[in-house]
Amino acid sequence: MVARRSEVFTESVLWHVDAGAPEVTAAPLPSSADVVVVGAGYAGLAAARRFAEHGRSVVVVEAGAFSTGASTRNGGMVIPELKAGPGALRERYGDLGTRMYAAVNEAFDWTEQLITEAQIPCDYQRTGQLYLAHNEVAHRAMREAVADHRAHGEDVRLIEGEALRSEIGSSAYRAGMVIARTGGLQPARFHAGLLRRCMALDVQLHAHTRALAISDDGPGAHTVTTDRGPIRTDLVFVATNATADHLLPKLQRRVLPVGSFIIATEVLDEELAHSISPHNRMLVDSKNLLFYWRLTPDGRLAFGGRRSLRSTTVADAADFLNDSMVRVHPQLAGTAIDFAWGGEVALTVDRLPHVGSFDRVAYATGCNGSGVALMPWLGMRMADAMIGEAEAPPFIDLRHPPVPLSRWRRLWTPIVGSWFRMQDRRR
Ligand SMILES: Cc1cc2nc3c(=O)[nH]c(=O)nc-3n(C[C@H](O)[C@H](O)[C@H](O)COP(=O)(O)OP(=O)(O)OC[C@H]3O[C@@H](n4cnc5c(N)ncnc54)[C@H](O)[C@@H]3O)c2cc1C
């Protein structure tokens, strides 16, 4: 059904309205720098800041406006997760699994600490996550996941049947798992905070500057060719998330960009908002093509997901998400939506983040939809590693497999999407 759009409805990002982004004055592009960072999302900005803290001259080139990437468009859920619990990761990856799990938790702690210490006004609150089982298979898996997390000392609770009503105003799910270590923030305000921190250390920030090619000019020497001219540099960090473009073809073959969309309702009556999510949790369900939703700091419901892996328009996605939202929360029937937007998530074959280098060019990618805490931390840690101040994050020890038949992905992603949907419909 077509969603009811309010009179002020716009296909744009709710978070951009009140981002508090600093004015960055345009300047001539320098011809050289110690480091060039490609991409001004969380990963690029956190890396740039770290390089600058180590006394390096840093240039960030961003293809679009600074608000272009997923970092100002996401759901704002700060979640330390790797799509599997600590025990399951250890079983699959041995000691590396344990180190990767520790890394996402370190990333979560670091992000919380950064927000507090740098006083980034991004409405951060640790309200917890409610992860919801959509069918019996997921319910059984959830029981095991709760046991796994609890065995590792985590504050995680299983809630089943009627008791779930104290957590969510919906009868669409069989069980839920409350995970204490999760928070919510206003993503564009967090991004603005990172921009400001870069400016304070004289990082040179260049919007509307697309990197077109990177040449390897021998050990410690590169040229980054941009559409505004070349920059000679010692180090290059590519932080382009899902869009590796032709910059690093080997990286491009290893990441699958997939659209994710969000609608935001009009501001809700307080009682209605409370009936939906009494504890203001970050809500996520267990489907392959999952939904994620939350109350926003200004009292709306933001509801996100995707119908399939096919490319689609924001308008279509908005209608699908509105239908889905009302199926989960019938009390929202007739509520208008004010905003709808989309962005790209970087998927990898093993659904894990990856860092590394190709042809002496370093990168971090593959948030698989959970990068608010992870990507800035990976950026910061990669900067440390690139200048020899620390070891690279453990994800460097993962094999980074190419996406099979990546050149024909437009043909096969819809088939995988249909298979996901079929699985999701199982009772
Ligand atoms: C709709 C949506 C909802 C999400 N919700 C959540 C959530 O609730 N919680 C969570 O943890 N994660 C979520 N994510 C994922 C999270 O937003 C990302 O993991 C994170 O923002 C990635 O940060 P990044 O710095 O790697 O990339 P980005 O923020 O995407 O930045 C990459 C930048 O690189 C630029 N770029 C690309 N190519 C070039 C080039 N050739 N030259 C110059 N610049 C270039 C792009 O323009 C872009 O600005 C969501 C993502 C989306 C799209």
Image (spheres, rainbow, N blue to C red):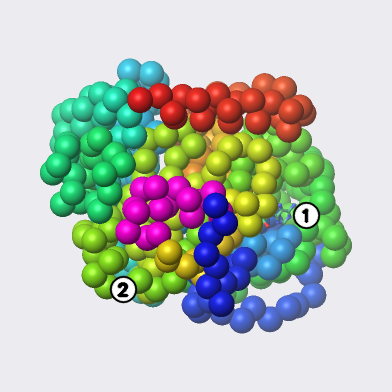
As drawn, 22 above or below 264: below
Can residue 52 be spotted in the picture? no
**Front position among marks 1 and 2:** 2
Point 55% across, 24% down: residue: 419
Instruction: Check disc 1 and give the amino acid type.
Output: Ala
- Range of residues picked out in magenta: 318-333
Q: At 72% from the left edge and 22% from the top edge, which residue is drawn?
A: 405
| Vertical comparison of 340 with 201: above or below | above
Which mark, by number, is residue 391? none
Residue 373 position, x and y percent, is 41, 52
Q: Quadrant of the C terminus?
A: top left
- Classify mark 1: helix, strand or loop: strand
Give the crowd class for mark 1: few <14, some 14-19, many >=20 residues within 10 Å.
Answer: many
Task: Find out whether residue 325 is within the magenta segment.
Answer: yes
Q: Which residue is mark 1?
A: 211
Distance CA(mark 1)–CA(mark 2): 46 Å
Locate residue 296, reporting x and y percent.
Answer: 38, 66
